[in-house]
Image (cartoon, coloured by chain):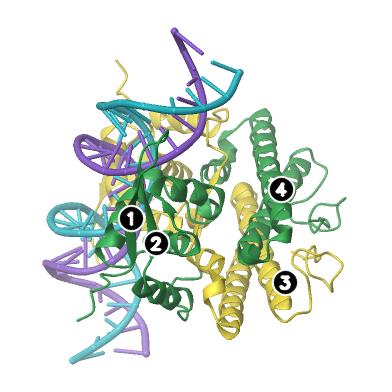
Chain colours: A green, B yellow, C cyan, D purple
Amino acid sequence: MTPRAATPNTTSLVILGLVGRRSESGYDIAARAARSVANFWPISRSQVYSELARLEQQGLIRGTHVEQDRRPDKRTFAITAAGDAALAAWVGSPGSPGANGERVRSEALARFFFAGWMTPEQRVQALTEYRDHARAHGEALQATFDRLADRPESHYGRATALFGLMQARTRVTWAEHMLAVEAGGAELGARESAEPLGRRPHY
Amino acid sequence: MTPRAATPNTTSLVILGLVGRRSESGYDIAARAARSVANFWPISRSQVYSELARLEQQGLIRGTHVEQDRRPDKRTFAITAAGDAALAAWVGSPGSPGANGERVRSEALARFFFAGWMTPEQRVQALTEYRDHARAHGEALQATFDRLADRPESHYGRATALFGLMQARTRVTWAEHMLAVEAGGAELGARESAEPLGRRPHY
DNA sequence: GCATCCATGTAATCTGTTACATGATTCC
DNA sequence: GGAATCATGTAACAGATTACATGGATGC
């Protein structure tokens, strides 16, 4: 009897994948998750610890106590053969229902949906802040993307960074378009106004 | 002493906003949420009921029993003056920390991050499914966007639909670019390849 | 006769965040 | 001396999903 997968949870599998890429401590995995998958699958530090414990108990990873001096001791985790199989099964699994949908939570958009309650100045402020935030985020991802250029082993990580980068650019474009609409210089969604949409970005 | 807001919750405020737009039953609000805000702030039906109860108890909305024959009775909710003030305060509030960040959860992207565990065929399949899903989603939003063209009162709802539409197009573009990369016809992020990025969409 | 829509809610469970607790070391 | 980094974990709670339960009306 195989050790019962108990409805595999995506967060758990992502952590399994990170361990599969490199054997590290919970602390390091959490830090790496924040630098990489956080853009499409955020994981809090405390959850890393609990999921690591669960994965170990399922036999998908194995922890080793590592003594250090001048630093606190730590436990590093390595993927097992069973873990590797479970990971490959998940990664290569055919489209399970809902697997292609993104679940987005954007407070800024939610608020903007009700922008009829805002004053015109508040709208401009909200859009400007949103655009600046998206721009900063895009620039951070651009840096990541560039940094990974000469690391072929991070090819797919780089591909997901490109994804985030493109999305961030789209957000900037949308916010700028909305600012133009607010200013009376464009019509919603119209493509004939000055560079409203489809602006050619360079990555 | 005002009835203590107890750290306003975004889901709650979104529901308050929906009630503010139109007085409806919990059932109808859930349905409307699924058609409108679900793209950037999904809310499950059962949560609508519990949040409505909470909002009523806070005095931000007021419920009225409505008898119907040939249909089960229902309770419709209307926003109160206090609710309107709370809504305006939230909607027009200056950028609270983290208010501009989106929290995205995409299982497809998470999986693709580990695409090194896939076979080339699996990669193509995953990307194709993802692209088709994004395309269908974009088309649905395009329909919404078009439908709202002559409803000035839904201007900002239409603006958020445009947002979703642009994002969906970007996802399609990314997936197609990745397919080209997989096929060996393009380099990751290169803009000189045949229409990889920055393709001019028409809304 | 069966599925679907209308309509409301509860219960169980899971997921996820934040705060708390501890303690050495290193850098400024 | 004080802040930050390394390192692990627990506990409390908030947020959210799914399944369960009920029942009439309508449409095929």
Is there CB contact under 8 Å for labels 1 and 2?
Answer: yes
Q: Which residue is mark 2?
A: A78
Q: Chain of mark 3?
A: B
Give the crowd class for mark 1: few <14, some 14-19, many >=20 residues within 10 Å: few
Q: CA distance from mark 1 to mark 4?
A: 34 Å
Amino acid on which disc 2 is placed? Ala
- In the foreground, A119 or A53: A53
Which of marks 2 and 1 precedes in the sequence?
1
Q: Residue B82's image quarter?
A: top left
Q: Which residue is mark 1?
A: A64
Q: Which residue is mark 4?
A: A143
Question: Helix, strand or loop at disc 3?
Answer: helix
Question: Helix, strand or loop at disc 1?
Answer: strand
Q: Is residue B166 above or below residue B97?
A: below
Do marks 1 and 3 share a subunit? no
Give the crowd class for mark 3: few <14, some 14-19, many >=20 residues within 10 Å: many
